[in-house]
Amino acid sequence: MTALPTALTAGTWNIDALHSEFGFVARHAGVSKVKGKFTEISGALEVGESLEDTKVVAKAVASSITTGNEQRDGHLQSGDFFLAEEHPEVVFESIAFENWDDDEFTLRGTLTMRGVSKEVAFDAEFNGVATGPDGSLMAGFSAETTINRKDFGMTFHAVLGGGELLVSDKVKLHIEIEAIKAD
């Protein structure tokens, strides 16, 4: 059994949506990067007695995607990408916390978008535990991975005159989580 950091006590830690982010970066036209995020996220970390007994579930409302451009956001919600009306949630469910070294580890799990589930591995970091102004315990985590959007049925394909893709197939996902210990 792999021991947990001593500050991360067993029990339920709920994701604090106001202090968390689930975002992404995709290359646009081969020359720039477009950043976006989901504004409605939720979930919980169920901390067990060991890493093997610990699970996390994180969810985002697909239609809450924002990139700062309403037209692009609408396109991302459409059938070309998230098909948000038929598949309203993006869900990550952990399978394993692996290779824990100091505060860095691999978080392996199942990512479901657009009704397609694939196993992914995030490079993750435990950012520690602190006591909030109201006396609650808070824990922080950061995680990143790169996916191929086509693996999730997002097959929109537009090629520009020089052969560049309008939207890259590879998309970087990043997650910043602040979780609050439930009483």
Image (cartoon, rainbow, N blue to C red):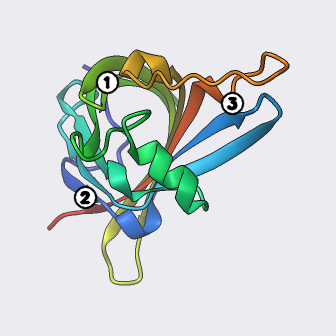
Q: Quadrant of the rendered structure where residue 19 is?
A: bottom left
Which element type, helix, strand or loop, lies under badge 3? loop
Q: Amino acid at mark 3?
A: Leu
**To which residue does mark 2 refer?**
14
148 sits to left or right of 79 = right
Out of 19 and 127, give the one closest to the viewer.
19
- At x 50% / y 33%, what residue is drawn? 124
Mark 1 / mark 3, whichever is N-terminal: 1
29 sits to left or right of 65 = right
Which element type, helix, strand or loop, lies under badge 1? strand
Query: Disc 2 to disc 3, how far (Cα)?
Result: 37 Å
Q: Amino acid at mark 2?
A: Asn
Query: Disc 1 to disc 2, how far (Cα)?
Result: 18 Å
**To which residue does mark 3 refer?**
166
Out of 4 and 28, give the one closest to the viewer.
28
Query: Disc 1 to disc 3, how far (Cα)?
Result: 29 Å
- At x 70% / y 33%, what residue is drawn? 27
Which element type, helix, strand or loop, lies under badge 2? strand
Q: Amino acid at mark 1?
A: Gly
Tag in front: 1 or 3: 3
- At x 78% / y 28%, what residue is drawn? 30
Q: Would you place residue 60 above or below residue 183 in this image?
A: above
**To which residue does mark 1 refer?**
109
Out of 154 and 104, give the one closest to the viewer.
154
